[in-house]
Image (spheres, rainbow, N blue to C red):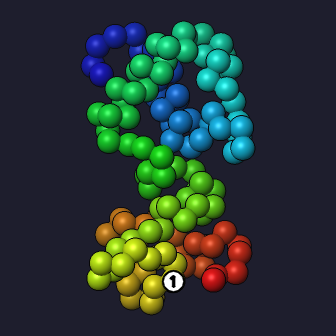
Amino acid sequence: MVRGDLRIWAAGTIYAIGRVNFLFDPSHGPHLTADALATRIGVAKSTMANKARVILQALDVSEFDLEFSRREILMSSPVPWLVEVDGIIMDARDLPDSLYDEARRRGLIPDLPRGEAYNGTTPH
């Protein structure tokens, strides 16, 4: 990532972050097609997508990444909250406070206080 056109690497970065945050999925908002993004940036979609793939692989980033996902994405899906406790997959939001805090401290779940973890909905 140290060589090449900075504009194309920037486009790849924008595409990568958009992909992680479901920008190209019309059921999520905000939404933009990859074609529209490429047009706005002025880079070929395939070039932008290829650079994004390199970036995502190099940084080991994917959907629900705790560092690069929008807060709304993390709060609206159960995936980032799944943890294994004694061999059982659980929703971390249902754990006792001490385990919830430890999972949060270790970076296993989003770094949100328990009160914000449900996005204003009632805990189950």
Residue 15 in the image: above or below residue 97: above
Quadrant location, the C terminus: bottom right
Give the amino acid at mark 1.
Answer: Asp
Q: Which residue is mark 1?
A: 94
Q: Image quarter for residue 45?
A: top right
Position of 103 relative to 30 (above/below): below
Tell me if I can see residue 85 in this picture: yes
For residue 108, above or below residue 3: below
In percent of width and height, residue 6 lies at 41, 15
Residue 95 place in picture, x, y as percent: 45, 85
Residue furthest out toward the front: 88
| Quarter of the picture holding the N terminus | top left
Point out residue 64 in the picture as x, y percentages from the top left corner. 48, 52
Which residue is pictured at 63% across the width and 56% down the height? 72
Which residue is pictured at 45% across the width and 90% down the height?
Answer: 96
Residue 102 at least partly seen: no
Residue closer to the observer: 94 or 13: 94
Tell me which residue sits at (44%, 68%) in the image: 82
What is the quadrant of residue 41 in the picture? top right
- Disc 1, SS: helix
How many neighbours does mark 1 have within 10 angstroms: few (below 14), some (14-19), or many (20 or more)?
Answer: few
What residue sits 66% from the left and 69% below the top? 119
Where does residue 90 sit, x and y in percent of width and height?
44, 77
Image side of residue 69 versus residue 89, left or right: right
